[in-house]
Amino acid sequence: MNLDTNIDNNTLLKKDNINFKGKLSRWYRFLLTNKGIFFGSLITFIVIFCVVFAPLVTTYDPLKQDITKRLTPPMWQDGGSIEHILGTDSMGRDLLTRIIYGGRFSLLLGLTSVLIALMVGTLFGLITGYYGGFLENILMRIVDIQLGFPFIILVVIILSIAEPTFWVLSALFSLLLWPGYARVVRSILLSEKSAAYVLAAKSLGASDFRIIIIYIARNIIPSMLLMSTMDIATIIITEAMLGFVGLGTPPPAPTWGNIMADGKNYISTAWWVITFPGVAIWITLFGINLFGDNLQQFVNPKLRKKY
Amino acid sequence: MKNMRTTIGSFIVLVFCLSLVLSSVVWAAPKGELKIGIAQDLVGNWDPTQHTVVTMLQVEPTYFDFLVKVNIDGDLEPMLATSWENIDPLTWEFKIRESVKFHNGSLLTSADVKSAIEYASSAKNPSSAWLPGEIKGKIVDDYTIRLITDKPAASLLYSLSMIPITNKEWVNNPEKFAETPNGTGPFKFVKFERDTLHLEANMDYWQGPPNLEKVQFQYIIDPSARLYLVKTGQIQIAGRLLSEQIPIIESDPNVVLEKNPIVEQMWLWFKCKKSPFKDNPTLRRAFAYAIDRAGITKYIMYEQAKESNSLLVPGVFGYAPASNMPSYNVEKAKELLAQAGYPNGQGLPPLKLMVAVGAWPKCKEYGEYIVENLQDIGIPIELFTVEIGRLGAICFDEEPEDYDLQITGWNPTGLEPDLFLRALFYSKPGRLSNIDVPEIDQTLDKELNILDLAKREQVIQNETIPTIVDYMPGLPLFQTVELKAVRQEVKGFKLLPSTVYDLHGVYLAD
Amino acid sequence: MPNNDQKNLLDVKNLKTHFFLNNGQILRAVDGISFSLKKGECLGIVGESGSGKSVTSRSILNCVESPGKIVDGEILYEGRNLLTMSEKELRKIRGSDISLIFQNPTTALDPLQKIGDQFFETLKAHSSYNNTVIKEKVLETIKSLGFEKPEVIYESYPCDFSPGYIQRIMIALAILCKPKIVIADEPTTTLGVTIQSQILSMLDRLRTELGTSIIMITHDFGVIAQVSTKVMVMYGGQCMEYGPKKDLFLEPKHPYTIGLIRSVPLIEARTIKKLYTIPGSPPEMINLPSGCVFASRCEYVGKKCLTEKPPLKKLNEERYCSCHYPVEFNTRDEIII
Amino acid sequence: MEQSLLKIQELKKYFPIRKGLFKKQIGIAKVVDDISFNIGKGEVVGLIGESGAGKSILLQTIALLRQPTEGKVVFNGQDLADCSKKELKKIRKQMQLIPQDHQNSLHPRMTIREILKEPLKIHGIGSKDEKERKARELLELVELESNYLNRFPHQLSGGQKQRVAIARALALRPELILCDEPVSALDVSIQAQILNLFMDLQKQFGLSYLFVAQDLAVLRQISYHILVLYLGKFIEIGLDGIIYENPLHPYTKTFLDASPSIKKNIYEGERIPITWGDVPTPLDPPAGCAFHPRCNQAIEICQKVEPKLEKVNEKHFVACHRVNE
Amino acid sequence: MKQIIIKRLIIGLFVILVVTMLTFALLQLFPGDPAKMIAPWAGEETLIEIRKSFGLDSPFHIQVLKFYQDALKGDFGESFFYREEVRTLLFSYFPRTIYLTLGALLMALVISIPLGVLSALNRDSFIDRIVLFISITSQSLPNFWLALMFILFFAVKLGLFPAGGYGSWQHLFLPSFALACTLIATFIRSIRSMMIDVLEQDFIKASEARGIPRLYIIKKGLRNTFVPLLTLFTMQLGYMLGGAVVIEFIFNYPGIGLLAMQAVLRRDYPLIQGLVVLISTVFIILNLLVDLSYTYLDPRIRKEEL
């Protein structure tokens, strides 16, 4: 360690943190200063707000069909009307409402699958990382098998055995994601296990359980947070892909994938049916990725701006 | 009277064909390659008896010939059989055309016909579904043969138009048969590269060589992909397109839109052996009246469907609009619902309408629309979507727990009425609706045994169809209209109601 | 200011390197340093962490990490000012005239590249020999420092040797292009005592036999005592005291130097007693106090110290001290008990 | 010596060297090989050895963070090997380890308050505000202002972190503290402050230390008894500072010569002694006496036979063939 | 080096064994009947006949045993639908997907390496912001949407490339570009962060201090980022195969993804089994290659392994 260049650490921060108190201050200050995180969280917040409070934002029922108003163009184009701002889809349902309700489904799906995968993966990672030995071999082989199995075949088989409801899909996606988390947690465990503060804790008499949960878990949370923001984005796209190929959630439930799958065939005549869900995905993922990407700086000190 | 007209009609058509044949002989040697994009992919096994897949039946006429042929007006026409007569209710005698060569050069004789027909009709092979039962062949001489059915079958002639005549060596050697077909058709088999079938002109075809040098059938899964390939000229004909794509086709000068009503009909089937539909035709009729079939055709299917008002489709022998076919009438539906014991839906268990996603176009959309129509009159019903594999497995079950009604299409690619009526409504196989009513079975047996075409037509129209419609085991939603995009340079391409490809007369203008 | 007769190899005049932080504050890491270096001399720069000694070394080669920038002063190397040179010219100097040895040997070499290749690319950048000649010169340099099998070293990777061995290889790499000045930035902090003495003796032989002058940067007084000929004590980015080693150790004038010398544990101490310690802790580099930067921790603090920044007084020919009231102190009675 | 606080008898810690397909064991790394010594109450024992000599492993084995391969660790007359988990936890209150890498011996994401409260939480001592009071008390003990409680470790300087580590070790009022190179990476002035702190605490609480360092001058300030460790074995033990007066083992002599000192280098102007050879690794230790490749007095027997630790006199033990010539 | 290969192959075989067992179990649960897929309207007795010809009538464990015996001989049975050797089917479909994925990988690397390095070199500058914007957008846009836009614009409007199908390299360009988009995002970001890490390490500063030209230093940095980049690629591989299905669907590009989907939809058990074995073997071999390249490229790991 180079004694000379740790000027930045103690001199810089010692000065201005005396008036801020506790952990929250650090988060709060960082969020404001970093533009990326600010805009990222702003966009994500707006999207989540629209999706959660959908009934307030639009008055239409996403499933109500009105055949006569089929494929009306968006408001600003000729033939469009103020009632349907973004026009209607092939069954005459309001596109904006379906996108918002579809968003609710996709985001919720992304969130639940990531959470499940996070829990399972972290549990696996903690056990294999900390105890190692025979148990580690078995669990790591399970991870290999999981990664070895071709995802597309698994999806098609499972989606034809069980009816593709919300929970089946989120179980499926968490099946896809959990090995990633297990590996990351295991690698952190291996490096942290022999860290000095763990030795000190052991010499104080702390039990293995306490060391894992209270000590090492804290270091896992930041990178888990980072990975899960990225994975939510992947799941939203994968769900849209499944819907596109006709495997995803059954109609008439609106999801971004389903809406786009319908719109695919009208691409030349009713371009808006496929374009606007794509734009919706782009905006949401842009917010999530911007937030996740800049969060990385907060998590990974090396990337953090030095001065 | 009608019968006389058909024979004269067929005579004129014959002359026309001959002239065409003559003119094609004069025509220059075959040139150019025609590439056709098809919607379902082909099975790798070329033995026609081993499958009942629609796409194969459509493609086989390009490299196989049949005893009899159904022309554009839906009438029978001699092909490999120059003439035929009915000796007694069980036997038919056919005169075989002479000097017809197989692709491998061997001459066509009645022995080939005997082996082909017997092989096709044996219960072991799937193709037996098209025939009324086991058929025995008795060779009179090299060019005459007698076919004996085990029970009188008026539908024999039309069914024979679907059984290709194959070489007897091939029939006794199924392995070889699976590799390459050996027929007498206008084109010869070259190779099959997984998704593309390559054929080339059969120079010594008995009607003269075809105008095209090469033909290619390529399987393209996505309708928009098919459309763009035909627009960029990588393929010349793209089948099974969607009505939404019509504006794109019409806006493109070098692609022509062909609309062709085909023998396929989409049905809404009631599970007649499962409560609440069991022994309750009034309830079934109540459902029938509640569904806005006109709306589906007009707003959803748009150009891709035609109103259907009978159990058969125009072009099929014995077709006529059924008088008692229900139309969209909400009050009558509610009235019948109350009569059936469920006043505006009370007492009905929660029902499920099964629909297969990805098989028939827009099945999902009109499935949703029907569910909404039924919900409007108080029926507790939900949409239950499955993928085609699963539907195929459970669509015939008599007491399925997963669903109560289903939307399934029926396309026998033949014009014989029994391929519709007997196959769907006879109690024994009792396929999609599992209807089991003796009265329906009697009328079906009655019309099957009438050998005289005119009398058989009269019985079908006035007795068989009305009785079945009364019992309402299934409601025909609409007749499919296939949309094809054909490039300008393709000339002489005819769309047959049975959707088979007749490419003999087609040529490419440069 | 030290006299600037031509004999000086390197002359640093009033060097100032400041770090412009993104929250607007300015960190004066090096605030007016002047020194000179003659051929065959070893200048020991000693100071605690945060005193700016490392930044000085980087400033000489003008490769200060962002956001640090050299704001003032001159660095004359053989009469030419390094600060005003173009990047191309400067690159010729770096590695061939002045070379740098880093502190941590384990991360000083590219882990994926053979050691020989790293020598090769350095010599290739500074000479126009063809490849075979370069390889011979590399092997010859390695052999000259007493390594037995240079060919084996040439072909092996950094991870194949112990840290001590790698640091000696780094010295060979530093003298590959026959530089006139070698700057060693705390070369032995991570190594054990016996290995440290090997490194220091090797550096010492460089100076005595080849005449290369050395700038040794360390916080360990022992290393300074063993190797250097001239010493500069740094604190808070400024030079406290500057002079020949013997005089500075025997009669330190500046209270900070005195404090440091007295708090060094003596191997000859007979009884266990408490060590002398300098009260307080290192200064805040952001807003340094107006007067003398050591005032807050100084035993001999006077009136003027708090208000006026002491200039660098010239005590005699080679001795300088920046203190208003230089202290008369004789280490002899303190050390030899 | 009265009943010693800590007795170590033939302590061994071997690590298998595994290679190849099924990680077959192809050798043994004798990191700690046959170590015996004891520490009395209130006594400070210094341990000197270069990196790779096995100092940290020895300390961790004594603190039973690692299972010893052979040998006994007796603390307060109780052999730690046959204690139950609960008893072991009680003993841990009396014996504390301050780990080597002090830069991250504090959990990066815990505030100093939480770090100081941990020992009390683990052993469930005192109520909530008692813990708070104890934390503030500990901070005063190591001369840090109480507003440091809210800070994070990365906001402290090296010296301050070490103070917090010491405070944490004192939380349970231990009798013995094993310090693993507590001052080796600190600046001179900070090093002096920490050493003085160690000495004050030793007087105030009558603690006994096993003090590990890489610099003999530092050890001289705090302890009389010096153990010299080389490649897992003791090669010389000197009580009451006898090592400095009359070093016997060649390694200790080279070590003393190589240690820089102002008196020697400034007054007597001695040149830097020439030493050679590299630090050996336990993976393939040299045959016979481990020091023979680097020893200028090595003779034929040194390369074959490993010298045993013999008693020269009451206060001096050495393991070298050339000593009693 | 040999030990690693042997060890990995043994583990690989074990994984394939378990994966195939899993597939067999899944296929049992699978509703739908292969015979009905071939002859949907045939009568019951013909269906029984067909099932017998497929060997489905024998009990489960015999089918499993038979599968493994044949598999050892390299014969994976005959596909129900295509009535062809599964082996020949796979050998003709698999290279196409390899071209697609390799094309996508190449394109992703060609685009993301310069951008990643550029944004790492001048960090937090204007270029850095643009590159990050590109990387985030390319990850947020669904690749099937991009594919459609490519067809509409490049193939139909400009006619530069064929709108689909398989043939020469032109057919390959658009699909691999669409597939590469999601890869570009992750590659750019990881190259940037790894490059920043490496450039801050001592040996880079030391080489600068030795007057080594800037270009060589960037080359050194890249070599050090290449090794971790390899692991990233294998992690992405699983996703690429899944993603490829949609691209194959839209571009009508007959690859493994499309074949897999149809095989499952059509209940073509031997073909499904063959695909599972093929894909898991490819995955295991690729993992092995990446690990071997690790030991080859990074001497530190090679020292530990041997």
Image (cartoon, coloured by chain):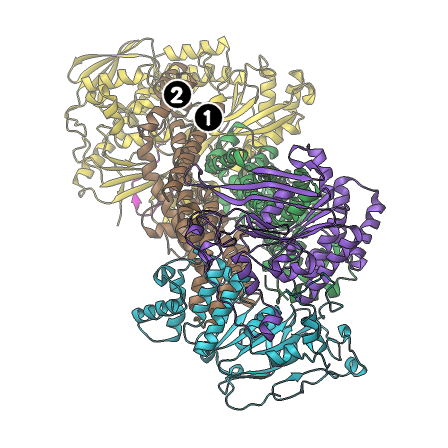
Q: Nearer the viewer, residue E220 or B126?
A: E220
Q: Is residue D82 shown above or below C266?
A: above
Categorize mark 2 by other alpha carbons within 10 Å: few (<14), some (14-19), many (20+). some
**Chain for colour cyan:** C
The segment highlighted magenta reads B484-497
Q: Which chain is yellow?
A: B
| Number of callouts | 2
Magenta run includes residue B70: no
What amino acid type should be assigned to the residue bearing mark 1? Leu
Q: Is residue E280 visible?
A: yes
Chain D, chosen colour in render: purple
Q: Nearer the viewer, mark 2 or mark 1?
A: 2
Chain E colour in the picture = brown
Q: What secondary structure is marked by label 1?
A: helix
Residue depicted at x 27% and y 45%: B508
Q: Colour of chain A?
A: green
Residue position for label 1: E27
Query: Would you name the residue on which mark 2 appears?
Result: E63
